[in-house]
Amino acid sequence: MWQRRLLNERGSAPVESVFAIALVLFLALGIIQVALTLYARNVVLASAHEGARAAVELGRSLHEAEQVAAAAVSDAVGGLATDIDVEVTEVTLEQQDRFDVVVRASLKDVGIIPLPISVTARASSSRPSPLP
């Protein structure tokens, strides 16, 4: 009786192994995709801060600040995001110039399941207003 049961299950171990390996591979690739997406999101967020800092240090006018911030963001993000939109506004309050940088981008599709993810990052930095 045991011999007949063993003969009926012959070849089941390789089939079960293939299914297990496929499941583990799918989970590992999903984890890698999530990690790359989070990395790209963090780069976009950090580049907004870099753009705000660069606008304060290098930009003398709003237009120059916007150009500097856009260049800083595009250099930092590289190929991780598409449709990058940088918006810079300047507010002057109590002898302080504050630059607010808003970065909108779409993260590139990476991994086996392409999911479009849009990211919006906001950062601000201030400096003393120039004397009149």
Image (tube, grey):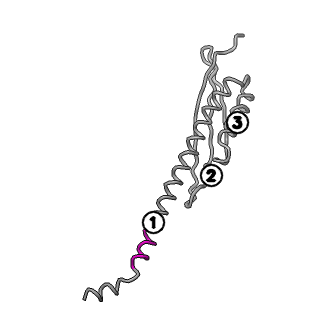
**Which of marks 1 and 3 precedes in the sequence?**
1
> Which class describes the residues within 10 Å of circle 1: few (<14), some (14-19), or many (20+)?
few
**Which of marks 2 and 1 precedes in the sequence?**
1
Above or below residue 46? Residue 36 is below
> Which class describes the residues within 10 Å of circle 2: few (<14), some (14-19), or many (20+)?
some
Q: Residue at x 56, y 41 (%)?
A: 42
Secondary structure under tag 1 reads helix
- Which quadrant holds the N terminus? bottom left
The overriding secondary structure of the stretch rendered in magenta is helix
Which residue reaches farthest top?
132
User: Which image quadrant is residue 105 in?
Assistant: top right
Magenta-drawn stretch contains 14 = yes
Residue 83 in the image: state x and y as whole percent.
67, 47
Confirm or deny contact between disc 3 and disc 1 (CB under 8 A): no
> Which class describes the residues within 10 Å of circle 3: few (<14), some (14-19), or many (20+)?
many
Distance of mark 1 from mark 2, alpha carbons? 25 Å
Q: Which range is magenta?
A: 12-23
Q: Residue at x 44, y 71 (%)?
A: 19
Residue at mark 3: 70
Q: Which mark is residue 108?
A: 2
Distance of mark 3 from mark 1, alpha carbons? 42 Å
